[in-house]
Structures are given as structure tokens and as C-alpha cells.
Amino acid sequence: PAIKRLDTTQGGRKTSAHATPRSLFAQLDAFGNMCRAGAGWGDALVSAFSGHQMTMEQAALCVQAYWRRCQATLLLQEQRGAAITIQAVYRGHCTRKKLRARAMAAARVQARLRGNAIRDATIYDLVDYRAATMLQSAWR
């Protein structure tokens, strides 16, 4: 014999339908799940036989948990973005500092080479000048 179940809604209108063993087991499973989740025995029984999978309190807790999870996810993404920005700024600073040090070292090397070249050229010019002076003094 089929068990009659009242207050079944289909498409917005109330109808009476027969409860099959499968739907009865589904209601019993929903009742057990609600009891294990902390709902009271009476609330769980009424909700299960009304065709609901959870009580109103459990539904409210689910919505609250979902909202808090969304907020936490947004906050985490914002913090990750801030951390990435800080890391990028720091890496850029370090890179510019290294490039500046390399440029200073290259400038020092270039200055040393130019100084040596000028000193060498000056010495050779001085030798040539002295040689020319000696030749001129000997010629006169």
C-alpha cells in the first residue's frame, strides 16, 4: 500500500502524491542528516516529511557560511595581490640598485682606462717633445 503524502508542490500548486519507498528512504536519510547536523528531533522530522533536506536554521547557517567563505576568499585575493605588488616593488628596487652599482663600476673602469691612456700619451708626447728640443738645440 502506498502512503499518502500531503503538501507536495509541483509548479507552484499543491497536489497530493503517493510516497514511494524510494522517496520515503530519502526522507528518512534527510531526517538522519539533519539530526546529525544538530537539528532538533521535532524540527528535523517536520522538515524531512515536508520534503526539505534541512531545517530553516541549517539553511541560514549554510547561507552565512557561504557568505563568510566568499568574503574570506575576496580578502585572501586582495592580500595576495598586495603581497605580489610589494614583492614586485622590492625586486625592482634590488634590480635598479644592482644596475646602478654595475654602471658605477663600469664608469670607474672607463675612467681608469682613460686616465692611463692619457698618461701614456702624455709621456710619449713628453718624450717626443724632449727629443725635438734636443734636436733643435743641437741643430742651432
Image: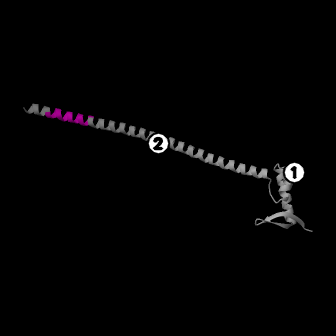
Q: Nearer the viewer, residue 127 or 4?
A: 4
Q: Tell me which corner region of the image, top left, top right, bottom left or bottom right, holds residue 11.
A: bottom right
Q: Secondary structure at mark 1?
A: helix
Left or right: 93 as drawn, with respect to 61: left
- Name the N-terminal-most of marks 1 and 2: 1
Label 1: how many Cα within 10 Å (few below 14, some 14–19, many 20+): few
The majority secondary structure of the magenta stretch comes to: helix
Provide residue 22's location: percent of width, then percent of height: 85, 65
Q: Secondary structure at mark 2?
A: helix
Q: Which residues are magenta?
A: 119-132
Which quadrant, please, contains the N terminus? bottom right
Q: Which residue is mark 2?
A: 95
Provide residue 111's location: percent of width, then percent of height: 33, 37
Residue at the image point whose x is 70% and y is 51% from the top: 66
Q: Are marks 1 and 2 in contact (CB under 8 Å)?
A: no
Q: Which residue is mark 1?
A: 41
**From the viewer's perspective, is the residue at label 1 or at label 2 nearer?**
1
Circle 2: residue type: Thr
Residue at the image point whose x is 47% and y is 42% from the top: 95
Left or right: 61 as drawn, with respect to 26: left
